[in-house]
Image: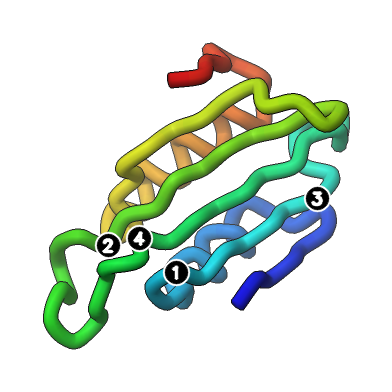
Amino acid sequence: MVYQLQRPSIEMIIDYCRDLLADEKLEVYEFGQNCDLVLHIYKDGEYSPSADKDIFNMARVHTARDGKWIDEKEDIYLNDEQFLRQELERINKYRNFGIL
């Protein structure tokens, strides 16, 4: 399943990420201070909420602008909402972009 949001708040993105199931994806359009970024957030395909309640709840965030990948971050633990919030704020402010 792929969910799509347009110009959401960081809190709304965090709420959606919290509810993603294994192999689900969230696409966020018009993100960033200039509303020119697209986020692709992928939930770990092996995550099982009943078996892995406190561990392995991870996602990958890939960021594109003008159809080109400009940033990616692997192993974002979704149980730590503060870490996810910091990553989203970093991307929103166009800081330290990099491709692994």
Which amino acid is tagged 4?
Answer: Asp
Label 2, label 3: how far apart the Cα atoms are: 23 Å
Residue 80, given in percent of the width and then of the height, sits at 29, 53
How would you rate the neighbour count of disc 4 (Cα within 10 Å): few for under 14, some for 14-19, many for 20 or more? Answer: many
First of labels 2, 1 by sequence position: 1
Which of discs 1 and 3 lies nearer the camera? The answer is: 1
Cβ–Cβ below 8 Å for labels 2 and 3? no
The quadrant the N terminus occupies is bottom right
First of labels 2, 3 by sequence position: 3
Which amino acid is tagged 3?
Answer: Tyr
Label 1, label 3: how far apart the Cα atoms are: 20 Å
Q: Is residue 76 left or right of residue 14?
A: left
Disc assigned to residue 57? 2
How would you rate the neighbour count of disc 1 (Cα within 10 Å): few for under 14, some for 14-19, many for 20 or more? Answer: some
First of labels 4, 1 by sequence position: 1
**Residue placed most toward the observer, 51 or 10:** 51
Cβ–Cβ below 8 Å for labels 4 and 2? yes
Which of discs 3 and 4 lies nearer the camera? The answer is: 4
Q: On the image, numbered disc 1 is attached to which residue? A: 23
Establish if 28 lies above or below 85.
Answer: below
First of labels 3, 4 by sequence position: 3
How would you rate the neighbour count of disc 3 (Cα within 10 Å): few for under 14, some for 14-19, many for 20 or more? Answer: some
Label 3, label 4: how far apart the Cα atoms are: 21 Å
Residue at 62 percent across and 49 percent down: it is: 40
Residue 15, given in percent of the width and then of the height, sits at 53, 68
Which amino acid is tagged 2?
Answer: Asn
Cβ–Cβ below 8 Å for labels 2 and 1? no
Residue at 49 percent across and 64 percent down: it is: 17
The quadrant the C terminus occupies is top left
